[in-house]
Image (tube, helix red, strand yellow):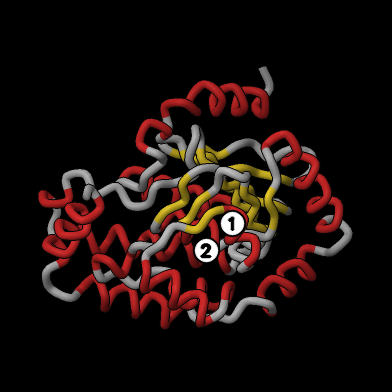
Amino acid sequence: MNRTRQLYVERKENHMSEVAALSIIDERGVQKISLNRPDKANALNDEMVDRLLGLVKEVYSRNIKVLILEGKGNHFCGGVDFSGYLDKSEGDLLLRFVKIEQILQLLRYAPFCTIARARGAAFGAGADLVTSCAYRIGTSSAKFRFPGFQFGVALGTRHLTRLVGGKKAREILLNNRQIDSLEALECTLLTHIIEDDDFEKEILHVVENVVKLSPRSVEKILFNTTQDTRDQDMADLVHSVSVPGIHKRIKKYREMSMK
């Protein structure tokens, strides 16, 4: 068995046991990261965050044209997994959010095209993962919510504002309301609504356009059309999580969510 085939088989065999998996690069220059905790709505625990951050960094070292981010099962990502949060220190919780912010920034400022494929719930940090991609393709079942400020965490605020405008962002964040796929498309949170059967056709269309450009041109287009607020975003995140009482705020939010 040649080395390429061996790597493919190894990745295929290990895929279901990994909390997030990286596909091989196909002949079009497309690679895929799949979130793989479907029984937990692909929620972001420490293992998932570490794995996802490592995979996105790995993709940066490869010669790809398009990165697809998807979730296995019925949901894209239910947000941060707070299971066992009381056993973690404030520093541990801060570190997880910092790593999530690093992932979001790597996606937002990637030198290649990024595509989020969203079905079902994309809540909290999961919604931020979607909005951090250049193409945000949802099925009709996609739904979004940004509850971070309900427990005092500022994550993705400026980027959401750039996508949907200040008035809409305030409405979404102040009311913590769920947004369906049609409203998400209308306010440009989504760029497309495409059912699964038509997804590959849309990917082919994106790739056909990207390959006409040099990698340098793609990088410049993406960078010059994205306002760079990385330092401000990270500072806001760290400041918000560092306010004393994060455990109490999470507890109160979880109790309210169950009502």
Q: Residues within 10 Å of mark 1 (few under 14, many from 20)?
A: some
Question: Residue 215: x, y in percent?
Answer: 77, 63
**Quarter of the image with the N terminus in it:** top right
Left or right of residue 234: residue 56:
right
Q: Nearer the viewer, residue 194 or 158?
A: 194
Q: Quadrant of residue 147?
A: bottom left
Q: Amino acid at mark 2?
A: Leu
Q: Which residue is mark 2?
A: 106
Q: Residue at x 43, y 64 (%)?
A: 102
Residue 92 in the image: x percent, y percent? 20, 58
Q: Nearer the viewer, residue 35 or 183?
A: 183
Residue ID for mark 1: 60
First in residue order: circle 1 vs circle 2: 1
* Alpha-carbon span between mark 1 and mark 2: 9 Å
Q: Residue at x 62, y 76 (%)?
A: 226
Is disc 2 surrounded by few (<14), some (14 to 19) or many (20+) residues within 10 Å?
A: some
In the shown orientation, is residue 27 left or right of residue 20? right
CB contact under 8 Å: marks 1 and 2: yes
Q: Measured from the top left, where is residue 100 in percent x and y?
A: 39, 59
Up-down relation of residue 162 to residue 56 (above or below): below
The residue closer to the viewer here, 238 or 136, is: 136
Which residue appears farthest toward the right when viewing the image?
212
